[in-house]
Image: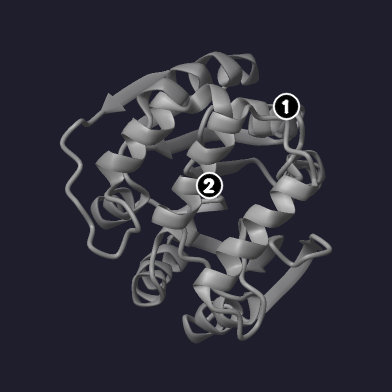
Amino acid sequence: MTFQFNADSQEQESLGRSPADLGVFFSDTWQIYQKILLNNHMHHKELYALVQSISHQQPHPFEMLDLGCGDASYTATALRNSPIQAYTGVDVSPVALEIAAHNLASLSIPIQLIEKSFIEFIDENQKNFDLILMSFALHHLDLTAKDQFLGKLLPRLNPGGTFILIDVFRQEGESLPAYYDRYIQQAHKSGWKLTPSEFITISDHIISSDLPDSIATITMLIQSHGCQNIDCLFLSHDTTIGLLKINH
């Protein structure tokens, strides 16, 4: 298992916050995010059941790239007993990566964990992968940057490869302020198990850092870069959270 920690991430104007700022935020608040995971407030159980199904259906031993891997707790479980032969995880939080190293150790395969923004990683690495997972990360880019990033990411799929995109989405025609209000109000009504101060911290992060687009918009961007086979396998009832499976 190798680690490549880089504390000198450069700011990207297209992020709601710079990669460095996001790394600090998630490192400082990782216990809050783990509460959200533990209580399944963002549908991780349902989403990663699909990741498990997709990974286990791979026709041959595969190499995987996990962009915004976090602590990889759900990913490690989903990959157990799959034909994975190598894993690369990329995240801006050193705290999350330290936990990920422990969670992934049981897979007994080559593991590489890299502290870097997903933009920097794709810009600097030309390696291709059979399976790419990007979970709750793309929405930190504005529309132009999403287009540019997807144009660089999708060619990193090997022929026949699969890209799994998990993210938050706006409703069609919905403004960002309306999205923020809907998401935060829905989280409040759903009874997220956070203290009042923790809920404020997460709400502030959503408003300052999240720039989601609609599923239709993201689908159009992906298709414009040559991937036409796109399936929406999960969509929460309020269309906030979804999973797209894209086959190369």
The quarter holding residue 171 reads bottom right
Q: How many marks?
A: 2
First in sequence: mark 1 vs mark 2 = 1
* Mark 1 element type: helix
Which of these two is toward me, 143 or 78? 143
Q: Which residue is mark 2?
A: 203
The quarter holding residue 35 reads top right
Name which residue lies at 37% across and 49% down.
118
- Locate the C terminus by quadrant: bottom right
Image position, residue 198 (x, y; %): 55, 31
User: Is residue 88 found left or right of 229 in the rendered image?
Assistant: left
Name which residue lies at 51% across and 33% down.
70
Does any portion of residue 73 appear in the rendered image?
Answer: no
Image position, residue 122 (x, y; %): 33, 54
Residue closest to the far front: 196
For residue 38, which numbered disc appears in the image? Answer: 1
Image position, residue 211 (x, y; %): 46, 65
Which of these two is toward me, 193 or 15? 193
Does any portion of residue 93 appear in the rendered image?
Answer: yes
